[in-house]
Image (tube, coloured by chain):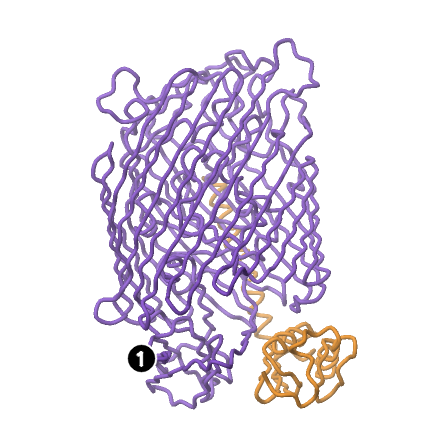
Amino acid sequence: MKTISQIFYKSVLSFFIILGASLTMSAQADNQTISFKVYGVCGECKERIESAALDSKGVKKAEWDIQTDMLVLVGSSKMDKLKVAKSISKAGYNSEFAKADKKGYDKLPGCCQFVEGADKH
Amino acid sequence: MKHILFYFSAFIGIIGVGHAQDISVKGVVMEEMNDGSLVPMEFVNVYWQKSTHNTTTDSTGYFFIAHGPDDGEQLIVQFLGFTPDTIKVKPGQYLSVVFKEEASQLEEVVVAYRKRTTEVSFLDPLQVQSISKEELFKAACCNLSESFETNATVDVSFTDAVTGAKQIQMLGLSGNYTLLSQEQMPGVRGIATPFGMLYTPGAWIESIQISKGAGSVVQGYESITGQINVELKKPKDEDKLLINGYYNESSRAELNFFTRKNVSPMFKTALMGHYSVRPTEHDRNDDGFIDMPTGSMLTLANRWDYHNNKSGFEGQLNVQYIQDTKEGGQASHHEHTHPLYSTKIDADRIQVFAKLGYVFANKRYNSIGSQWGFTRHNQKAAIGNSLYDAGQTSLYGNWLYQSIIGDSRHKYVTGFSFRYEDYAESFRGSIYDFKEIIPGAFFEYTYIPDNRFTVVAGLRTDHHNLYGWLVNPRIHLRYAPNETTVFRVSAGSGMRTPLPLAENLGWMASSRTWTIGEPGETKNDYPYNGLEMEKAWNFGASITKEFTIDYRSGLIAFDFYQTRFTNRAIADLDISPQQLHVYNLNGKSYASTFQVEAQYEVLKRLDLKLAYKLQDAQITYQNTGLRKQIFTPQSRFFANLSYVSSLATYKGHWRITGTAHFTGSQRIPDTFANPVDFQLDAESPGYWLFNAQLTRVFSKTFEVYVGMENIGNYKQKPVIVDAENPFGSYFDSGLIWGPIFGREWYVGFRYILK
């Protein structure tokens, strides 16, 4: 029984060490919020814009609003809006800071291949 | 009907982590029907536009959302197929939202969020874990038994070398005490127990729900430790075509496919297939016996779905056919001084399920349903000199009625069920035949005063033609003091008919003489020479806490469950190494488990899961009194780390996952009466197993995976007692506590057309 309780304490301990470490990291994290416009038209666009933004360095949370075209990002100091815009451009979308990459745009599903100014759907 | 059919499938509430405050907004969401009546809408997503803290409506259309300082004033009420409604609200306000279907406008609304691959339901009063398809993709997953490789709750035993039988354990007890269901219909049970886990191909599985503790009375009286429900891919699925191929080091090759077609707007159909084969004999440990049986399995399924929105009728029909052949025993190339000891087990099975439901117009909470099942299973086994033939015909039917009492805070499900089972077995010349005819009735009441509290109280009474009246009460309580914490308590009784031959098939490959029940001196007419029904009570409690640290979510859960048997059929292997006696429990038997599990996205896209389980299972044996149950590890530790290279899953990316399992020492049946050479240790050593898998997703339609199981190449030694003399009096190949084959690589691909 001794070995079992030892294993148990070890695993509980290691869990709290990990938890503690992440808490410390988050305490150090000085999050900032930035926002800019990305032009999309539908729900599928939302998924692609947000995942492209989240894949960029430092981004912890990304939310795009279909009504206002506004992308709101929360992230660490490593987050760079130009890099995020580039990643979104590669995914095929126009934004305030970058034009859509042609290759990315061609790969978009039909519902997302908007002519600029197309109706939201 | 949907409510009934999937009543106990896990409903995963997407509960955002909010700052619990007293200031809140409550309300109700309704749909205006064509005739002007209002119907409550379930599963409607309600969230703050600014912070996205969200909740969903319950089956009564009711929602409750806390309001924090960063939530803003705009509340969005959103449901698939309807234009989202944005409302400016003041905290404390009671809202009434009415949606109206606009015939021309069907908008696709995608709510983007990162779902954990194993979710613990927040709203369900039962402690339910849901394993998604994505989680299943983390392991080789050839069949249902392997689906639990990245799960800590269900333990899978090692396939025994000679017969290939594979079973699971949950809450420290054999899978016999867990109700296995397929889409809430009775799944693998009875004669199919030893191999049934292999009959559901992994590639067909859409999701699995594991609920711990006494289950719902609607599903029957058999769930004692819990329920494992498997949802297969459906005709209404998104995927049009799936092809999966797999090959591993033991030369096992496998091909799976799924395809679906819309025959008409109301009729949909799907066809599924699986063929696997292991043609080559392997004897890595050089004991003369092949390490796993060779053989092949073919299974085909056809499903039909009928859905009529106008009339309210829904229906399903599923037909599955299985053919399985296994050969094991001594390797044919080995030099033997006697005839070969060989095993051949052939099985075929046909199962048909049908479901029909009707939802009353304008009263979504009111529905009638009926479910029907028919199964025929044949199995012929020759294990050494022992012949075991078994057949089972099952017929199952139930009628369910769901409604409310007064208002929708008080819901109930009630109905009748009927089961007919015809068993015919013969083993070493003895014949065991019996029939079960079991009509029953059940009533389950659910009280949901608000989002915080739920009570489910159920009672079922069945009349068994052999065992008389069976009464089983069950109760579940859920209390969520805030949006991230849930307490659950459950208690209930369960019963089952023991099937001592099928359940202990692995031990047929031994020199043991079998005594079933008390031949010649039975005091009753029960099957198997007087074995009584197994009866047990299960009590459990759990706490689940969700948290978000730095925008990454996690959860921690503690649970404790105890099963206490009032009767149990004990398979006693300790009397002597040459005997096996199955008899009624006379004294105490219980199993207690304590489990702690934690999940957290430790770094962006890197998920960590840790679990530790402490188990204590004891049985009062005839000769030795209260003792540890055999082959039940006292402790288990589990860790899984998975990384995905991109959240944009529509394009190419990588997935990598690694798992470590520790299995504590297990009691091995006594062998000290054998000559010294044929004695085993009293306990197995504890050991670690490591698995890893790498998946390359090339596009939405194609992915390739490679993996390795048991990287540390750990093997049980010895596997077989007196392997040299399989017809001698010391031979035993059923004492399995660890892996036999050792390290094994595998490769596979998936082709998916949406």
Chain shaded orange: A
Q: In front here: B598 or A98?
A: A98
Residue A16 in sight: no
Q: In front here: B708 or B12?
A: B12
Write the residue at 53% across / 78% down.
B107
Residue B577 in sight: yes
Colour in which the image shows chain B: purple
Q: In front here: B546 or B371?
A: B371
Helix, strand or loop under label 1: loop
**Chain letter of the residue carrying label 1:** B
**Could you say where residue B71 lies in the image, as x and y percent from the top left?**
47, 84
**Could you say where residue B456 lies in the image, as x and y percent from the top left?**
28, 59
Write the residue at 64% across / 21% down.
B287
| Type of amino acid at the residue the image marks with label 1 | Ser
**Which quadrant would the C terminus of chain A be assigned to in this image?**
bottom right
**Could you say where residue B314 lies in the image, as x and y percent from the top left?**
40, 60
Q: In front here: B94 or B589?
A: B94
